[in-house]
Amino acid sequence: MEKEKEVKIRIRDLHKSFGKKCVLDGVNLDLYKGESLVVIGGSGTGKSVLIKCIQGLLIPDSGSIEIDDIEIVNENPDVIDRMHSKMGMLFQGGALFDSLTVWENVAFDLIQNRGFNKKEAKIVAIKVLRQVGLTEDIADLYPSELSGGMQKRVGLARAVITRPEIIFFDEPTTGLDPIMADVINDLIIESAKDLGATTLTITHDMASARKIADKIAMLYQGKIIWYGTVKDLDKTTNPYVRQFINGSSKGPIKVEK
Amino acid sequence: MIIRLGEAFLRTLGKPLVKFLYSLGDLTSFFVKAIYHCFVPPFYFKLFFKQVLDIGFYSLPVVGLTTLFAGMVIALQTYSGFSGFKAESVIASVVLISVTRELAPVLSALMVAGRIGAAMAAEIGTMRVTEQIDALVTLSTNPFKYLVAPRLWAGLLVLPLLVLIGDIIGIFGGYVVGVYKLGFNPANYITATFQDLQYIGIISGLVKAAVFGFIISMMGCYHGYKSKGGAQGVGNATTNAVVSSSILILIFNYLITEMFFSR
């Protein structure tokens, strides 16, 4: 049944090392159209590297990444730029531009690449800011004047303003209180549903993963060691996954103390 | 035993050499990319004018004060050094030559390197470590075109203007000391200055300024762009930008002087 679904992102045998440290060691993963995939794993397991390879921010050592059946590894910048126009990304720390106001951040892509004039772009930016629960008053503030939760919302608004087909979320709830984290989770679900977008989230927040995921994959020592639905997650006997979701220090995953 | 010692010696020598060659290759690759993107659209004119304001207008007080006092001190030193030879009349000429050929371009560039090179490295470095540069890429905006090219153009074009103003202020400094402290006749001093005015001196100073402006921007952008490791990384980038641009300014100052005046 699943084979009939359209694959949006196909990753095969992806390798990436930094010096002698092997971070991705043959990752294979399919992300289906309209699906929400969450990649879980401990700190330093290569989750961020995986997302950066897909976005063309890092060049893998070997392997293949296809987006809509178009290979992007070692492709020329024009192809990768075209792919970026289909993508949105919410960064872990927001990555808002300090020198621009909130609305200029949100409308950045519209002004720079899509021919909007400032007046039109501001109207659209304020509309999207409202969709993520922010008011017009903050549009002219600078990012440093906002709280962490507000910065995440602005980042989310910037990620969805161009109605991308694929949205990446890098640790969307890290550094937020549990209530704000849940608000962000709801916004992610709403935005993805509204756009019909395919989403890839990396997190180690299990509450967030359970809430937003259709499918979950676990990355450990550079490999995908488990893949399944949220329901499967609770039934799995995989000792690595069990240890991770229980948050136990005892088990096969060894952490240096 | 000797072979082993030899191996150890070569290894000790080789590691920093490999590191140095790697850095040189990295800088060359950055340089080529930056130059390419300076000539390929889109061009961000608004960002260019912002940099012109930062590098040019806001550096005016620093450059003005530096060249004013440089001109004044040269007038004073020349007088104290040459007065025994009854050579007061050469003061105007010495001030003119030293300010336009050396002091205005070199001192202005060193001051701007401290002010602007450091700021560029800190700003771009912070953007690097807070993933703002990655965000630019994901928003289909090339960081070389958006961040580096406007700074390189502004550095290249604005520093000669700053130095031209510095030349005038420096010569004025010499005039102030000559006339008000040493009691020269103002008309004679001005006449002596214009008599000795050589275009080659002014032009060599302005060429130096353009090269120094380019070096300051290039080093600021390079070290900022390559910074990593949070606040400490940004701090290191800032230091490296100022130190490397200052050294390069002094090296290129010699090379350009050699090019213009060596016979």
Image (cartoon, coloured by chain):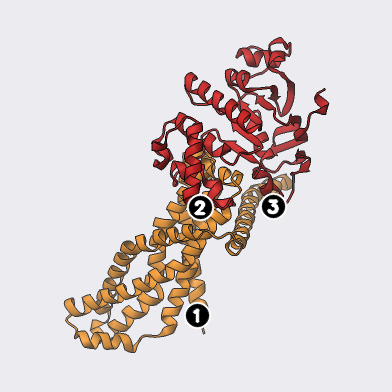
Chain colours: A red, B orange
Q: Nearer the viewer, mark 1 or mark 2?
A: 2
Q: Quadrant of residue A214?
A: top right
Compute the Cα span from label 3 to label 1.
Answer: 44 Å
Residue A41 location (% of width, % of height): 65, 24
The answer to whether one can see residue B86 in this image is no
Q: Nearer the viewer, mark 2 or mark 3?
A: 2
Q: Is residue A96 left or right of residue B61?
A: right
Q: Which residue is mark 3?
A: A78
Q: Which residue is mark 1?
A: B260
Do the dots labelled 3 and 1 sit on one chain?
A: no
Q: Secondary structure at mark 2?
A: loop
Q: Chain ID for label 3?
A: A
Q: Which residue is mark 2?
A: A117
Instruction: Decide: is A213 above or below B136.
Output: above
| Kind of residue indicated by mark 2 | Asn
| Mark 1 Cα-neighbour bin, 10 Å: few <14, some 14–19, many ≥20 | few
| Kind of residue indicated by mark 1 | Phe
Return the residue nearer the eye: B150 or A250: B150
| Mark 2 Cα-neighbour bin, 10 Å: few <14, some 14–19, many ≥20 | few
Q: Identify which residue is drawn at 23% across, 88% down.
A: B188
Q: Secondary structure at mark 1?
A: helix
Q: Chain ID for label 2?
A: A
| Kind of residue indicated by mark 3 | Asp
Return the residue nearer the eye: A39 or B249: A39
Residue B196 location (% of width, % of height): 35, 87
Q: Identify which residue is drawn at 43% across, 67% down.
A: B159
Q: Chain ID for label 1?
A: B
User: Could you say which disc has been placed on residue A110 in the image?
Assistant: none
Instruction: Decide: is A72 above or below B204.
Output: above
| Chain-order first, disc 2 or disc 3 | 3
Compute the Cα span from label 2 to label 3.
Answer: 24 Å
Q: Identify which residue is drawn at 63% across, 11% down.
A: A250
